[in-house]
Image (cartoon, grey):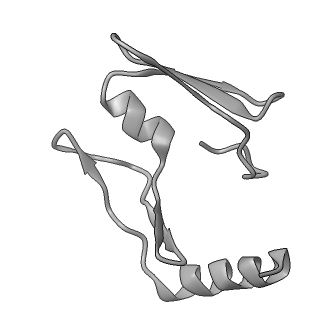
Amino acid sequence: MSKEAIYHTAVDDLKRMPPVSLKVNGKNMTTKAININTKLLVPLKEVFESCGAMVKINEAEHSSNCSFPRFFIRSGSWSNSSGIL
């Protein structure tokens, strides 16, 4: 599937599928999840922070670091041009 076809599928899904409310540890998230091509995309930064993580975004490298009290997660590149994680 071409990038253009994937883009149009995602845009069609966003028009058709309503945003999904999220609740983590009993707290409603302010950013809603979206359903694109049967994949639920959640706002990881907000979800991780609600679980007690420290999240640092590196815009220049298109990466993020998430530190929990007992472990550390490093994400690779993201393709979101807005830089939202």
Q: Residue furthest left?
A: 26
Q: Position of residue 18 (x, y in %)?
A: 42, 79
Q: Position of residue 46 (x, y in %)?
A: 43, 38
Seen at 70% across and 31% down, the residue is 63
Seen at 36% across and 67% down, the residue is 20
Q: Position of residue 30 (x, y in %)?
A: 39, 49
Q: Residue furthest front?
A: 1
Q: Position of residue 6 (x, y in %)?
A: 73, 78
**Along the horizontal axis of the image, is 82 left or right of 41?**
right
Whether 65 is drawn above or below 83: the answer is above
**Along the horizontal axis of the image, is 71 left or right of 1?**
left
**Which of the 4 quarters of the picture holds residue 53?**
top left
Whether 22 is drawn above or below 44: the answer is below
Seen at 50% across and 89% down, the residue is 16
Q: Residue furthest top?
A: 69
Q: Quadrant of the C terminus?
A: top right
Front position in the image: 79 or 16: 79
Whether 69 is drawn above or below 53: the answer is above
**Which of the 4 quarters of the picture holds residue 78?**
top right
Q: Quadrant of the N terminus?
A: bottom right
Front position in the image: 30 or 9: 9
